[in-house]
Amino acid sequence: MGKPSIGDQELALLQYLAEHNHASVGEVAADFGEARGLARSTVLTMMERLRGKAYLRRRQVDGVYRYSPATGPGEVMRSAVGQFVERTLSGSVSPFVAWMSERAEVSDTELAELEALVAQLQSRRKET
């Protein structure tokens, strides 16, 4: 079984820490927390929960705990998307694809990424 699920706020915190690696609770609270109206104690609780779920690592440097993601940001996002598809879409990506097709603001870059993913899926299917 995979790692425990995480909420939107926890995912945002993980993304923040991926960009600000080896940050202390105080640093995260001052930047990430204040921007969202979160108290330092709330940020600490979130970070410790994420550490308990094995999403964050902590090490002491000069008497201060520094936190960093246990995995790369891509893995965290893939896990969150997978959980969303399983829980919300009952395992089917069709509703998401339908939503994407109706969305007007798909950039050329996003479209190229989607085409590359479809080509990759088709290639895998031919192999099996």
Image (cartoon, grey):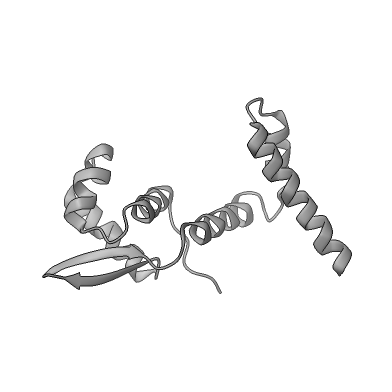
- Residue 46 at x, y percent in the picture: 29, 57
The extreme left residue here reads 63
Rendering coords of residue 38 (x, y %): 23, 44
| Quadrant placement of the C terminus | bottom right
**Residue depicted at x 24% and y 53%:** 43
Horizontal and vertical percent for residue 44? 22, 58
Q: Is residue 47 left or right of residue 94?
A: left
Is 49 above or below relative to 35? below
Does residue 55 sit above or below 118 in this rendering? below
Q: How many marks?
A: 0
Viewer-side residue, 75 vs 112? 112
Is residue 111 found left or right of 11 in the rendered image? right
Name the outermost residue toward the bottom: 1
Residue nearer the viewer, 80 or 19: 19
- Nearest to the observer: residue 19 or residue 87: 19
Q: Is residue 54 left or right of residue 66?
A: right
92 or 24, which lies in front? 24
* Image location of residue 102, percent across then percent down: 71, 29
Q: Compared with residue 15, is residue 53 higher up or lower down, i.e. above or below?
A: below
Residue 57 found in image quarter: bottom left
In which quadrant of the rendered view does residue 21 lie? bottom left
Residue at horizontal 79%, vertical 52%? 119
Tell me: 107 left or right of 6. Answer: right
Q: Measuring 19% from the left and 45% from the top, which residue is drawn there?
A: 30
> To which quarter of the image does residue 60 belong?
bottom left
Q: Quadrant of the N terminus?
A: bottom right
